[in-house]
Amino acid sequence: MKILATVKRVTDPDAKIKVLADGTGIETEGIEFKVNPFDENGVEEAVTLKEAHGGEVVLVSIGTEDAIANMRTSLAVGADRGILVLAKDEELDSDITARIVAEVAKKEQPDLIIIGKQAVDGDSGQVGQAVAEYLGLPQACFASKVDVNGDKVVVKREVDGGIETLEMDMPAVITADLRLNVPRLPKLPNILKAKRKKIEQITPADLGVDMGLKVETLRFEAPPERKGGEFVKTVEELIEKLHNEAKVI
Protein backbone atom coordinates (compact mmCIF):
# COMPACT_ATOMS: atom_id res chain seq x y z
CA MET A 1 0.00 0.00 0.00
CA LYS A 2 1.32 3.43 -0.94
CA ILE A 3 0.30 6.45 1.12
CA LEU A 4 0.89 10.08 0.16
CA ALA A 5 1.03 12.40 3.19
CA THR A 6 1.35 16.17 3.20
CA VAL A 7 3.88 18.10 5.30
CA LYS A 8 3.51 21.87 5.55
CA ARG A 9 6.11 24.12 7.19
CA VAL A 10 4.36 26.61 9.47
CA THR A 11 5.31 29.05 12.19
CA ASP A 12 5.46 27.60 15.68
CA PRO A 13 1.82 27.53 16.88
CA ASP A 14 2.98 28.68 20.33
CA ALA A 15 4.97 31.66 19.02
CA LYS A 16 3.74 35.22 19.42
CA ILE A 17 3.12 36.49 15.90
CA LYS A 18 3.73 40.14 15.01
CA VAL A 19 2.47 41.82 11.86
CA LEU A 20 4.97 43.91 9.88
CA ALA A 21 4.40 47.66 10.12
CA ASP A 22 3.58 47.92 6.41
CA GLY A 23 1.01 45.09 6.62
CA THR A 24 2.75 42.97 3.98
CA GLY A 25 3.25 39.93 6.18
CA ILE A 26 4.41 38.74 9.57
CA GLU A 27 7.73 39.20 11.33
CA THR A 28 9.68 35.96 10.87
CA GLU A 29 12.94 37.04 12.51
CA GLY A 30 13.54 34.76 15.48
CA ILE A 31 10.41 32.67 14.79
CA GLU A 32 10.80 28.90 14.78
CA PHE A 33 9.11 26.88 12.04
CA LYS A 34 7.63 23.43 12.58
CA VAL A 35 5.56 20.81 10.80
CA ASN A 36 1.87 21.70 10.80
CA PRO A 37 0.39 19.81 13.81
CA PHE A 38 -2.46 18.29 11.77
CA ASP A 39 0.05 17.06 9.20
CA GLU A 40 2.01 15.43 12.03
CA ASN A 41 -1.11 13.40 12.81
CA GLY A 42 -1.43 12.54 9.14
CA VAL A 43 2.15 11.34 8.87
CA GLU A 44 1.83 9.32 12.09
CA GLU A 45 -1.28 7.59 10.73
CA ALA A 46 0.40 6.90 7.40
CA VAL A 47 3.42 5.32 9.11
CA THR A 48 1.17 3.30 11.44
CA LEU A 49 -0.80 1.93 8.47
CA LYS A 50 2.44 1.08 6.66
CA GLU A 51 3.70 -0.81 9.71
CA ALA A 52 0.44 -2.78 9.85
CA HIS A 53 -0.06 -3.47 6.12
CA GLY A 54 3.32 -2.88 4.48
CA GLY A 55 4.03 -0.49 1.65
CA GLU A 56 5.52 2.98 1.32
CA VAL A 57 4.88 6.45 2.74
CA VAL A 58 5.71 9.35 0.44
CA LEU A 59 5.73 12.91 1.79
CA VAL A 60 4.81 15.95 -0.27
CA SER A 61 5.57 19.51 0.77
CA ILE A 62 5.22 22.82 -1.07
CA GLY A 63 7.60 25.63 -0.21
CA THR A 64 11.19 26.76 -0.38
CA GLU A 65 14.23 24.64 0.38
CA ASP A 66 13.80 25.68 4.03
CA ALA A 67 11.05 23.04 4.20
CA ILE A 68 13.60 20.24 3.75
CA ALA A 69 14.57 20.30 7.44
CA ASN A 70 10.94 19.83 8.46
CA MET A 71 10.50 17.05 5.93
CA ARG A 72 13.52 15.30 7.44
CA THR A 73 11.73 15.31 10.79
CA SER A 74 8.78 13.47 9.25
CA LEU A 75 11.10 11.10 7.41
CA ALA A 76 12.65 10.26 10.78
CA VAL A 77 9.21 9.25 12.05
CA GLY A 78 9.10 6.51 9.43
CA ALA A 79 8.20 7.95 6.02
CA ASP A 80 10.27 6.58 3.15
CA ARG A 81 10.93 9.48 0.79
CA GLY A 82 9.78 13.00 0.03
CA ILE A 83 8.80 15.30 -2.81
CA LEU A 84 9.34 19.05 -2.40
CA VAL A 85 7.50 21.28 -4.87
CA LEU A 86 9.39 24.57 -4.91
CA ALA A 87 7.18 27.64 -4.44
CA LYS A 88 6.97 30.67 -2.18
CA ASP A 89 4.08 31.27 0.23
CA GLU A 90 2.93 34.36 -1.61
CA GLU A 91 2.56 32.28 -4.80
CA LEU A 92 0.07 29.90 -3.17
CA ASP A 93 -3.57 29.77 -2.20
CA SER A 94 -5.69 26.76 -1.18
CA ASP A 95 -6.67 26.01 -4.78
CA ILE A 96 -3.10 26.05 -6.13
CA THR A 97 -1.97 23.92 -3.20
CA ALA A 98 -4.72 21.39 -3.90
CA ARG A 99 -3.93 21.24 -7.62
CA ILE A 100 -0.24 20.66 -6.90
CA VAL A 101 -1.02 17.84 -4.45
CA ALA A 102 -3.47 16.35 -6.95
CA GLU A 103 -0.84 16.34 -9.71
CA VAL A 104 1.71 14.72 -7.40
CA ALA A 105 -0.92 12.09 -6.59
CA LYS A 106 -1.49 11.41 -10.29
CA LYS A 107 2.25 10.83 -10.63
CA GLU A 108 2.58 8.62 -7.54
CA GLN A 109 -0.77 6.76 -7.74
CA PRO A 110 -1.17 6.25 -3.96
CA ASP A 111 -3.84 4.09 -2.35
CA LEU A 112 -4.46 6.75 0.30
CA ILE A 113 -3.84 10.49 0.46
CA ILE A 114 -3.69 11.79 4.04
CA ILE A 115 -3.76 15.55 4.58
CA GLY A 116 -3.92 17.57 7.79
CA LYS A 117 -7.49 18.87 8.10
CA GLN A 118 -6.17 22.45 8.18
CA ALA A 119 -2.92 24.38 8.46
CA VAL A 120 -2.49 26.48 11.58
CA ASP A 121 -1.29 29.50 9.57
CA GLY A 122 -3.92 29.96 6.85
CA ASP A 123 -6.52 27.93 8.80
CA SER A 124 -8.75 27.51 5.74
CA GLY A 125 -9.32 23.75 5.89
CA GLN A 126 -9.97 23.52 2.14
CA VAL A 127 -7.11 21.58 0.57
CA GLY A 128 -8.19 18.02 1.35
CA GLN A 129 -11.68 18.50 -0.05
CA ALA A 130 -10.35 20.22 -3.17
CA VAL A 131 -7.82 17.43 -3.80
CA ALA A 132 -10.61 14.83 -3.63
CA GLU A 133 -12.69 16.88 -6.08
CA TYR A 134 -9.84 17.32 -8.57
CA LEU A 135 -9.04 13.60 -8.48
CA GLY A 136 -12.67 12.41 -8.38
CA LEU A 137 -11.97 10.36 -5.24
CA PRO A 138 -14.08 9.61 -2.15
CA GLN A 139 -13.14 11.60 0.93
CA ALA A 140 -13.52 11.47 4.70
CA CYS A 141 -12.69 14.68 6.56
CA PHE A 142 -11.71 15.24 10.20
CA ALA A 143 -10.82 11.58 10.78
CA SER A 144 -10.48 10.40 14.38
CA LYS A 145 -9.90 6.70 13.52
CA VAL A 146 -8.77 4.92 10.36
CA ASP A 147 -8.83 1.18 9.55
CA VAL A 148 -7.89 -0.51 6.29
CA ASN A 149 -9.70 -3.72 5.32
CA GLY A 150 -8.49 -5.08 2.01
CA ASP A 151 -9.22 -2.52 -0.68
CA LYS A 152 -11.52 -0.51 1.58
CA VAL A 153 -10.82 2.06 4.29
CA VAL A 154 -13.14 2.68 7.24
CA VAL A 155 -12.99 6.14 8.80
CA LYS A 156 -14.65 7.35 11.98
CA ARG A 157 -15.16 11.10 12.31
CA GLU A 158 -16.68 13.28 15.00
CA VAL A 159 -19.85 15.13 14.04
CA ASP A 160 -22.28 17.22 16.10
CA GLY A 161 -24.47 14.21 16.88
CA GLY A 162 -21.67 11.80 17.81
CA ILE A 163 -19.47 9.54 15.64
CA GLU A 164 -20.04 9.00 11.92
CA THR A 165 -18.51 5.92 10.27
CA LEU A 166 -17.68 5.98 6.57
CA GLU A 167 -16.47 3.11 4.38
CA MET A 168 -14.72 4.01 1.13
CA ASP A 169 -13.09 2.19 -1.74
CA MET A 170 -9.43 3.03 -2.18
CA PRO A 171 -7.87 5.18 -3.51
CA ALA A 172 -9.36 7.81 -1.21
CA VAL A 173 -8.57 11.09 0.53
CA ILE A 174 -8.55 11.48 4.32
CA THR A 175 -8.00 14.63 6.36
CA ALA A 176 -6.51 14.10 9.81
CA ASP A 177 -7.85 15.56 13.05
CA LEU A 178 -5.76 15.96 16.20
CA ARG A 179 -7.73 13.16 17.89
CA LEU A 180 -6.62 10.65 15.26
CA ASN A 181 -3.45 9.69 17.17
CA VAL A 182 -0.49 10.92 19.20
CA PRO A 183 2.50 11.55 16.90
CA ARG A 184 5.64 9.72 17.98
CA LEU A 185 8.95 11.44 18.62
CA PRO A 186 11.70 10.39 16.20
CA LYS A 187 14.56 8.39 17.72
CA LEU A 188 18.16 9.43 17.19
CA PRO A 189 19.09 6.49 14.90
CA ASN A 190 16.07 7.29 12.72
CA ILE A 191 17.01 10.97 12.61
CA LEU A 192 20.42 9.97 11.26
CA LYS A 193 18.84 7.60 8.73
CA ALA A 194 16.46 10.32 7.57
CA LYS A 195 19.39 12.41 6.39
CA ARG A 196 20.06 9.78 3.73
CA LYS A 197 16.48 9.42 2.53
CA LYS A 198 15.66 10.91 -0.85
CA ILE A 199 13.82 14.22 -1.22
CA GLU A 200 13.05 14.96 -4.86
CA GLN A 201 12.77 18.63 -5.78
CA ILE A 202 10.44 19.64 -8.60
CA THR A 203 8.57 22.77 -9.68
CA PRO A 204 4.88 23.45 -10.36
CA ALA A 205 5.85 23.79 -14.03
CA ASP A 206 7.12 20.20 -13.97
CA LEU A 207 3.61 19.19 -12.91
CA GLY A 208 1.88 21.46 -15.43
CA VAL A 209 0.14 23.48 -12.71
CA ASP A 210 -1.10 26.98 -13.53
CA MET A 211 0.07 29.24 -10.68
CA GLY A 212 -2.59 31.91 -11.19
CA LEU A 213 -3.96 32.91 -7.79
CA LYS A 214 -7.70 32.76 -7.15
CA VAL A 215 -7.33 34.33 -3.70
CA GLU A 216 -4.92 37.21 -3.17
CA THR A 217 -3.89 38.50 0.26
CA LEU A 218 -4.04 42.28 0.25
CA ARG A 219 -2.95 43.12 3.76
CA PHE A 220 -2.26 41.68 7.21
CA GLU A 221 -3.67 43.32 10.34
CA ALA A 222 -3.17 42.38 13.97
CA PRO A 223 -6.36 41.82 15.98
CA PRO A 224 -7.29 44.57 18.46
CA GLU A 225 -5.63 44.18 21.83
CA ARG A 226 -7.84 42.87 24.57
CA LYS A 227 -8.92 45.26 27.28
CA GLY A 228 -8.28 44.43 30.90
CA GLY A 229 -11.05 42.85 32.93
CA GLU A 230 -13.27 44.66 35.42
CA PHE A 231 -14.30 43.79 38.94
CA VAL A 232 -17.95 44.04 39.93
CA LYS A 233 -19.39 44.12 43.41
CA THR A 234 -22.85 42.69 42.85
CA VAL A 235 -24.70 40.31 40.54
CA GLU A 236 -26.90 43.19 39.43
CA GLU A 237 -23.85 45.19 38.35
CA LEU A 238 -22.50 42.17 36.46
CA ILE A 239 -25.78 41.71 34.60
CA GLU A 240 -25.92 45.40 33.76
CA LYS A 241 -22.40 45.35 32.25
CA LEU A 242 -23.03 42.15 30.32
CA HIS A 243 -26.22 43.65 28.90
CA ASN A 244 -25.19 47.25 28.19
CA GLU A 245 -21.42 47.04 27.63
CA ALA A 246 -20.57 43.54 26.46
CA LYS A 247 -24.02 43.12 24.85
CA VAL A 248 -23.98 39.37 25.32
CA ILE A 249 -27.34 39.09 27.11
Image (cartoon, rainbow, N blue to C red):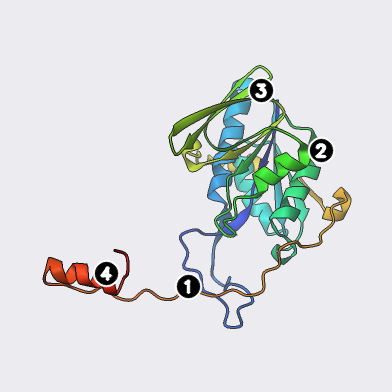
The secondary structure type at the circle numbered 4 is: helix
Distance, label 1 to label 3, CA atoms, is 47 Å
User: Could you tell me the amino acid type at mark 2?
Assistant: Lys
Distance, label 2 to label 3, CA atoms, is 21 Å
Which image quarter holds the C terminus? bottom left
Q: Is residue 77 visible?
A: no
Structural crowding at the residue carrying mark 4, measured as other residues with C-alpha within 10 Å and reported as few (<14), some (14–19) or many (≥20)? few
Distance, label 2 to label 1, CA atoms, is 40 Å
Residue nearest the viewer, comparing 2 with 200: 2
The residue under the point 57% across, 29% down is: 48
Q: Quadrant of residue 117?
A: top right
Q: Earlier in the sequence, mark 2 or mark 4?
A: 2
Q: Earlier in the sequence, mark 1 or mark 3?
A: 3
Q: Earlier in the sequence, mark 2 or mark 1?
A: 2
User: Could you tell me the amino acid type at mark 1?
Assistant: Pro
User: Is label 1 or label 3 in front?
Assistant: 1
Distance, label 2 to label 4, CA atoms, is 56 Å
